[in-house]
Image (cartoon, rainbow, N blue to C red):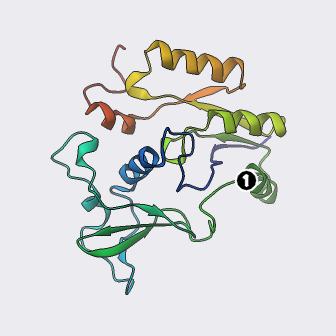
């Protein structure tokens, strides 16, 4: 059996995608763009912008208030656009072949079949949304093909609300693990970390 330990399914990324609002989701997406390896380019002439995506965040600030006000938009073909210093910019955060900036279970299953992968582990990174329900549904619809990881709000992982969410993910949705990442500690100004006793 061949298992791919890092796959993603997600809806069109310009929506709320399980967050309380589109704006909250776009904040998370913007933070994930900071320091990305692909160059930032100007829309009008495709020229590379010096400083790239590091300009999307004020690194002297430790929390979400460091995110620059840039009107981030998710378009098509892996492209994310924004307006900064009076000009439109973009980055190919995803491959240009991701035409709709969405990834369906059926599309991932086709890719798995194409390369001979039997089972895929669905990583629940925040940038794609809060997708416990979608992961549970994919595992139910395609038995034995997906292992879903539950999403947790890391700065509040020890709270009753988050523990209840994790119990639901495991007991009701059938998710088999937890996706937990240091990056989310931006939202508590990195006061705590992955190894905190909490």
**What residue is shown with label 1?**
108
**Which quadrant of the view contains residue 134?**
top right
Q: Position of residue 190 (x, y in %)?
A: 27, 32
**In front of the other: 82 or 155:** 82
- Total label count? 1
Q: Position of residue 57 (x, y in %)?
A: 26, 53
State the residue at coordinates (36%, 50%). Answer: 31
Q: Position of residue 65 (x, y in %)?
A: 24, 44
State the residue at coordinates (15%, 47%). Answer: 60
Residue extending farthest bottom:
45
Question: Quick check: 78 above or below 67?
Answer: below
Secondary structure under tag 1 reads helix
Residue extending farthest left:
60
Image quarter hosting the N terminus: top right
**Which quadrant of the view contains residue 170?**
top right
Q: Position of residue 188 (x, y in %)?
A: 29, 30
Q: Is residue 31 left or right of residue 131?
A: left
Question: Quick check: 138 above or below 32?
Answer: above
**In front of the other: 115 or 106:** 106
Label 1 Cα crowd, 10 Å radius (few <14 / some 14-19 / many 20+): some
State the residue at coordinates (35%, 74%). Answer: 88
Question: Quick check: 78 above or below 136?
Answer: below
Image quarter hosting the C terminus: top left
Q: Is residue 66 left or right of residue 153?
A: left
**In front of the other: 119 or 74:** 74
Q: Is residue 98 left or right of residue 67?
A: right
Residue extending farthest front:
21
State the residue at coordinates (33%, 57%). Answer: 35
**Which quadrant of the view contains residue 120?**
top right
């Amino acid at each position: 059996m061949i298992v791919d330990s890092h796959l993603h399914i997600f809806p069109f990324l310009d929506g709320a995608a399980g967050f309380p609002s589109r704006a909250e989701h776009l904040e998370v997406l913007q933070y994930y763009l900071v320091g990305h390896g692909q160059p930032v380019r100007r829309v009008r002439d495709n020229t590379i912008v010096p400083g790239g995506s590091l300009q999307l965040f004020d690194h002297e600030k430790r929390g979400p208030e460091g995110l620059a006000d840039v009107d981030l938009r998710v378009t098509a073909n892996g492209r994310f656009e924004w307006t900064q210093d009076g000009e439109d910019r973009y980055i190919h955060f995803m491959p240009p072949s991701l035409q709709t900036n969405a990834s369906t279970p059926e599309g991932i299953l086709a890719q798995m079949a194409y390369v001979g992968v039997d089972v895929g582990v669905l990583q629940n990174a925040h940038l794609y949304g809060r997708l416990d329900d979608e992961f549970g549904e994919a595992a139910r619809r395609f038995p034995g093909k997906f292992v879903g990881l539950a999403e947790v709000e890391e700065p509040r992982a020890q709270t009753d609300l988050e523990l209840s969410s994790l119990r639901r993910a495991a007991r009701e949705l059938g998710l088999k693990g937890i996706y937990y990442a240091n990056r989310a500690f931006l939202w508590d100004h990195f006061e705590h970390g992955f190894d905190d006793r909490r």
